[in-house]
Image (tube, rainbow, N blue to C red):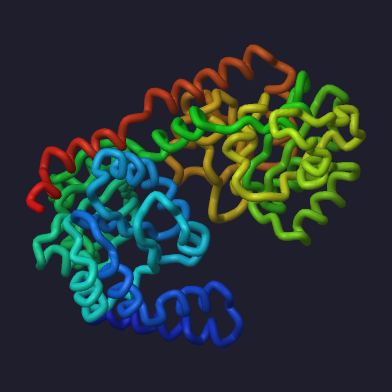
């Protein structure tokens, strides 16, 4: 059985490794450490100055987990305006992007998981309810919550056989699952796996991201410049692309360019060197920032865009637009599938009823697996297959329409996880004792 001795040793080694990395110039490690300096004093001062009702603590590992839990946060805020919300992150990639998020009262880094930190953190915060999103299992924080009889739930959980809970050495982690007040999982396979290790306080609620992408689609702002660029043309919107994706897209585009086609690329990294590389890869391509420079003085007007521009490719060089761009696509391409970490968010284009194409690394993403099985998404093993798949969709309007219908229907029918979680919190009356 994995003991707390080895766990504490691992935490200590992790902390030492971060200090070494920060000292040698690792920016992410430096942010991780600096963000936690004097955390107790800062948190005590901030929370002491706050007023209001009971506090609910929500923890996300990083930005992706935050976006997964965001529908619950925002719906909870509407349903319980009397409560204060504390959001913590483990990773700088979450905290640095969302440290000014207005949907909660406080945003902090989660302190390093030691017994002392966990006790001090809970002494200061005194939450009435703790909510962990998807993958976060910090032993001392969760064990201290259990000892203090503070309800703690996991939302959007997903479990696989290769996780420590299901290994011979996973006793400590199995105990954490048993100590949770309730576990909401994304699918029946996760529930069945937990039941095999005698974890039965589980509900199959689905994935809260479906609620999130549906809301984004309903609320999305128009992008008039992109709309006019894509108007009356067969447009492919490629989102969250990496260099391997862009090389595959170029191979397709260079070999199958037609005058009535447009390509919009929103890369995962928008640093200047990457944007310049894309402009070199696609000669004559436009930068969105250059296109936006033609904006007229009246926000409601649509500036003239040269839709016969020779490049026919638009490079998005800002953050925050991607989810609203998919509406202008005939076919969507989602990046990451040619790299070891796997694909990015396939639900964002699917919610607009668009067929989705991606690379071969997608098996750990249940929604991608299900979309492929249903016929709403298509995976390609290599560059030549991407060209073939793109042509099949762009040249076959019936196939494209049918696949898009399947994708949109899949998202629409998978909504509802947020409501199930909030109904449980309401039913258990975790917050009414105050």
Q: Closest to the observer: 361 or 294? A: 294
**In percent of the image, x 75 and y 57: which residue is there?**
274
Please indicate, yes or no, whether residue 322 appears anywhere in the rendered image: yes
User: In this rendering, would 93 be left or right of 87?
Assistant: right
Residue sitting farthest toward the top: 398
Q: Whole-percent x and y of residue 95?
A: 46, 63
Q: Whole-percent x and y of residue 132?
A: 29, 55
User: In this rendering, would 364 be left or right of 199?
Assistant: right
Q: Closest to the observer: 102 or 161? A: 102
Query: In the figure, residue 258 lies in which quadrant?
Result: top right
User: In this rendering, would 321 be left or right of 290?
Assistant: left
Classify 12 as above or below 395. below
User: In this rendering, would 429 be left or right of 270?
Assistant: left
Q: Whole-percent x and y of residue 200?
A: 13, 45
Query: In the figure, residue 140 lies in which quadrant?
Result: bottom left
The number of callouts visible is 0
**In percent of the image, x 28 and y 43: which residue is there?**
76
**In percent of the image, x 54 and y 55: which residue is there?**
341
Q: Whole-percent x and y of residue 191?
A: 23, 42
State which quarter of the image contains the N terminus.
bottom left
Q: Closest to the observer: 17 or 47? A: 47
């Amino acid at each position: 059985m994995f003991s707390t001795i080895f766990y504490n040793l691992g935490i200590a080694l992790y902390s030492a490794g971060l200090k070494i990395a920060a000292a040698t110039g690792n920016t992410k490690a430096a942010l991780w450490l600096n963000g936690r300096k004097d955390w107790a004093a800062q948190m005590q001062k901030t929370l002491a100055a706050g007023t209001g009702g009971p506090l609910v603590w929500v923890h996300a590992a990083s930005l992706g987990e935050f976006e997964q839990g965001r529908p619950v946060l925002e719906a909870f805020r509407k349903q319980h305006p009397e409560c204060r919300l504390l959001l913590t992150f483990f990773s700088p990639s979450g905290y640095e992007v969302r440290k000014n998020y207005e949907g909660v009262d406080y945003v902090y880094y989660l302190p390093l998981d030691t017994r002392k930190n966990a006790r001090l953190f809970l002494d200061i915060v005194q939450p009435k309810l703790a909510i962990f999103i998807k993958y976060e299992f910090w032993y001392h924080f969760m064990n201290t919550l259990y000892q203090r009889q503070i309800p703690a739930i996991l939302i959007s959980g997903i479990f696989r056989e290769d996780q420590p809970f299901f290994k011979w050495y996973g006793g400590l982690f199995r105990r954490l699952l048993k100590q949770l007040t309730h576990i909401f999982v994304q699918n029946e396979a996760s529930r069945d796996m937990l039941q095999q290790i005698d974890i039965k306080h589980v509900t199959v609620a689905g994935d809260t991201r479906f609620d999130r992408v549906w809301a984004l689609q309903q609320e999305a702002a128009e992008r008039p410049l992109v709309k006019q660029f894509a108007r009356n043309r067969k447009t492919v919107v490629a989102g969250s692309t990496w260099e391997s994706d862009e090389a595959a897209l170029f191979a397709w585009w260079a070999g199958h360019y037609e005058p009535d086609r447009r390509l919009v690329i929103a890369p995962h990294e928008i640093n200047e060197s990457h944007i310049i590389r894309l402009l070199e890869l696609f000669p004559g391509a436009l930068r969105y920032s250059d296109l936006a420079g033609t904006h007229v003085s009246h926000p409601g007007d649509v500036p003239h865009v040269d839709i016969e521009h020779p490049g026919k490719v638009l490079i998005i060089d800002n953050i925050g637009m991607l989810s609203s761009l998919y509406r202008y696509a005939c076919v969507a391409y989602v990046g990451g599938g040619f790299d070891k970490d796997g694909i990015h968010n396939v639900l964002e284009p699917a919610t607009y009823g668009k067929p989705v194409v991606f690379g071969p690394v997608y098996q750990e993403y249940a929604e991608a697996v299900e979309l492929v099985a249903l016929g709403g998404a298509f995976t390609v093993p290599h560059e030549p297959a991407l060209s073939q798949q793109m042509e099949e969709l762009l040249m076959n309007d019936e196939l494209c329409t049918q696949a898009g219908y399947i994708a949109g229907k899949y998202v629409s029918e998978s909504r509802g996880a947020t409501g199930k979680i909030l109904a449980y919190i309401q039913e258990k009356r975790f917050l009414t004792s105050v």
